[in-house]
Amino acid sequence: MLEVRQLNAWYGKAQILYDVSFDVRPGECVALMGRNGAGKSTTMKALMGVLAKRSGQVTFRAADVAHDISNLAPYRINRLGLGWVPEDRRVFTDLTVLENLAVARQPPRKGAPTWSHAQLFELFPNLGAMPDRPGGRMSGGEQQMLTIARTLMGNPYLILLDEPSEGVAPVIVEQMAQMILTLKRQGLSILLSEQNLHFARLVSDRAVVLEKGQVQFDDSMAALTRDEAIQRNYLSV
């Protein structure tokens, strides 16, 4: 579904990513892991084309057609069916839940799950209880749910989820885990940026561990769970 080869990225003159390579296969969840500053969010921004300076090859397969998205504008990448849920949520605070969802609506895509308001409210009951509430009057966890639901309104093939469990209540974290498992059952592919190993282990098939912008581990989640040295060197605080 997604092939990343020798991805490099810079903020100004500072290089952050160094030849990052990994894959996301259809219907699986890959956890992009590492400490703060390891390059997880930068990787997602580079994949979505929002960084001015980047290099490498990124191939996204949509409806059985391979697209080179290495140099595409963000809106064109999104229209191909790649969705992004940034870590800072970015809901439209003056718009209601329903209006936030309406903004992101895109046509159905061949081979991708198709989402409606009713389906999303079933996936996120909290949102279903407040369809007319403005985004600015919601808790952080509710805004996180709204951002994910809004991304799903684009009927993506794959979504980039950046730190969905960060800064939200434990009960919301549990709901997030169940949500990701449901999305996988629907056939959606997920690239999950996450520091919480327990959370990632619940939902992910494979893990890619970054340190200082370089890949240090790329294997199954079961292998990462067994590898105490990788956990100690690259994940522990």
Image (tube, helix red, strand yellow):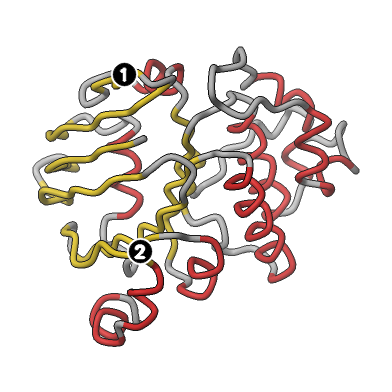
In the rendered image, residue 117, in percent from the top left (x then y), is placed at 79, 28
163 vs 11, nearest the viewer: 163
| Residue at far top of view | 107
Disc 2 marks a residue whose amino acid type is Met
Residue 160's mark? none
Q: In the shown orientation, is residue 219 left or right of residue 119?
A: left
Asked if residue 217 is positioned above or below residue 22 in the image, the reply reads below
| Quadrant the N terminus occupies | top left
Q: Nearer the viewer, mark 1 or mark 2?
A: 2
Q: Specify whether residue 142 is in view.
A: yes
Q: Is residue 211 left or right of residue 192?
A: left
Give the image location of residue 36, x and y in percent: 34, 66
Residue nearer the viewer, 226 or 140: 226
The quarter of the displayed image where residue 110 is located? top right
Q: In whole angstroms, how far apart are the C-alphas of marks 1 and 2?
A: 26 Å
Is 166 left, or right, of 217 in this rendering? right
Q: Where is residue 223? Give x, y as percent.
A: 33, 74
Residue carrying label 1: 73
Task: Where is residue 206? Give x, y as percent.
Answer: 38, 60
Does residue 87 appear left or right of residue 94 in this picture? left
The number of numbered discs placed on residues in the rendered structure image is 2
Local SS, label 1: loop
The residue tagged 2 is 33
Please tell me which residue is depicted at 43% across the width and 40% down the height of the picture: 26
